[in-house]
Image (tube, grey):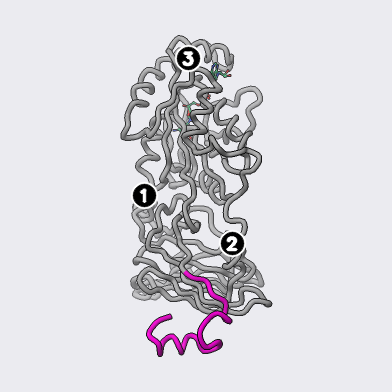
Amino acid sequence: MTGGPVSRCHHTVTTFGNKLVLFGGIRDSKPSNDVCIFDTTSRSWIVPEVLGSPPIGRHGHSALLLNEERILMLGGQGIPFHDAVWFLEVDTPYVRKQSQLLNTTVVAWSKGIFGNLPRPVVICGPSGVGKGTLINRLMKDFPSMFGFSVSHTTRQPRHLERNGVHYHFTERSWMESAIQEGKFLESADVHGNLYGTSIAAVESVANDGKRCILDIDVQGARAVKKSALDAAFIFIAPPSLEQLEGRLRGRGTENEEQIQKRLKNAKAELECGRDSSIFNHYLINDDLDECYSELKRLLGLDLVDANEVQGANSNQAWLDSIHGHSAALVGGNVFVIGGDIDPNVEPALIIIDTNCIVGGAPGQTTRLRLVLHKHRSELPNGNHFVKTSKENGHL
Ligand SMILES: Nc1nc2c(ncn2[C@@H]2O[C@H](COP(=O)(O)OP(=O)(O)O)[C@@H](O)[C@H]2O)c(=O)[nH]1
Ligand SMILES: Nc1ncnc2c1ncn2[C@@H]1O[C@H](COP(=O)(O)OP(=O)(O)O)[C@@H](O)[C@H]1O
């Protein structure tokens, strides 16, 4: 509890049950991204635990509660189109679970995306099967399309492995407390070391508009399957255990004891790979080029020229820097009226459909849909379109 948030202006306040959720505004002359909650029953302020990577600070945005579970934050001065929609989850299953775990009030950020973002890809398979080789090739051929989820691990770095690129190499005690604090999407003991995917790792790839690739073990795959992350699961198997052993030895990164441990674990992993309730696809990495072609086919890349792939959503500017507008919710449609989109562009009417949204924290919220976007000159009766539409009974 505190005496209340620092004074500000151009923020929003949204009602949620008996609480008021305050977000953003100009604070100390800068756009803010903090979240404060006022409990109207106890008349006290709560500073919640905020999960997920937050949006950059904003002011002049609008906020609407959807389905009594998440607040849609829209626009803000100087905020580009691709960053204009964010959701602050206040009572989703994820938030409820994290609140229980952390025994405090929790809210969680999730970025809103128009249309479908390709699903993240989970790649699984025994040590030495060629996962890293295939993923490296994919990242090299399609750098603007894929981003690697950099896991945390307590294992020692190998020669040429770089901290923050291949893994975040970490102390076990640090990682265990971060897991307790809910910062990890999943974590598992693998071959005697702790590995885990942080929520920040997945979000940072998704926030760059890229398709996230996760290289995780079968325990991790099981946990991700149960999470809100709507991923595609691919298992890579070796042609035989003998060839797997040959590749592991050939790589020369493990000692004999570690090789034996990895080969022993490989048998159970290979059985799990056949579990169609987890894995959508099962690939055998015999000939590397063939396996890579098959992987590309599964990911819909077989007809794509690697040189031509660009980032998503680059030319949609209709929500660019919208601020000072008002927004209202009718049947899952967000009606956005007015607002300074650009000093040279007149206010508009925008309708955004939220009925089909999927995903959410930890990760993005996708399938927002633009229903209508009109400039003022295109609306009936110019200046008075709100009044006129009320009279007409529709917007
Ligand atoms: N559950 C989980 N497994 C991971 C994660 N990162 C890597 N792994 C798995 O841990 C295992 C060992 O990885 P690594 O030490 O890099 O050895 P390698 O697979 O032999 O190259 C592999 O099966 C990886 O897929 C993670 O974040 N979570
Ligand atoms: N299809 C293949 N045929 C032969 N060797 C392969 C093949 N795929 C990968 N390799 C080699 O096997 C070793 C292990 O591959 P790696 O990508 O490190 O496996 P993982 O990431 O699954 O542990 C590497 O030396 C790699 O060059």
Nearest to the observer: residue 343 or residue 107 = 343
Report x, y in % for residue 62.
Answer: 51, 73
Q: Disc 1 versus disc 3: distance between alpha carbons?
A: 40 Å
Magenta stretch contains residue 375: yes
Q: Is residue 212 above or below residue 253?
A: below
Mark drawn on residue 244: 3
Q: Residue furthest right?
A: 344
User: CA–CA distance between discs 2 and 1?
Assistant: 40 Å
- SS for tag 3? helix
What is the quadrant of residue 59 in the picture?
bottom right
Kindly identify which residue carries mark 2. Answer: 316
Magenta-highlighted residues: 372-395
Q: Say which residue label 1 marks.
A: 101
Asked if labels 1 and 2 touch by Cβ distance under 8 angstroms, the answer is no
Q: Dividing the picture into quarters, in which one does residue 236 lie?
A: top left
Q: Nearer the viewer, residue 359 or 1?
A: 359
Dot label at residue 190:
none
Which quarter of the frame holds ligand 2?
Answer: top right
Label 3 close to label 2 by CB (< 8 Å): no
Q: Nearer the viewer, mark 1 or mark 3?
A: 3
Task: Name the amino acid type tagged 3.
Answer: Leu
**First along the sequence among labels 3 and 2:** 3
- In the shown orientation, is residue 349 left or right of residue 28? left
Q: Amino acid at mark 1?
A: Leu
Rendered view: 211 above or below 85: above
Secondary structure state at the residue bearing disc 2: loop
**Image quadrant where residue 382 sits:** bottom right
Nearer to us of marks 3 and 2 is 2
Residue 376 highlighted magenta (yes or no) = yes
Name the secondary structure under disc 1: helix
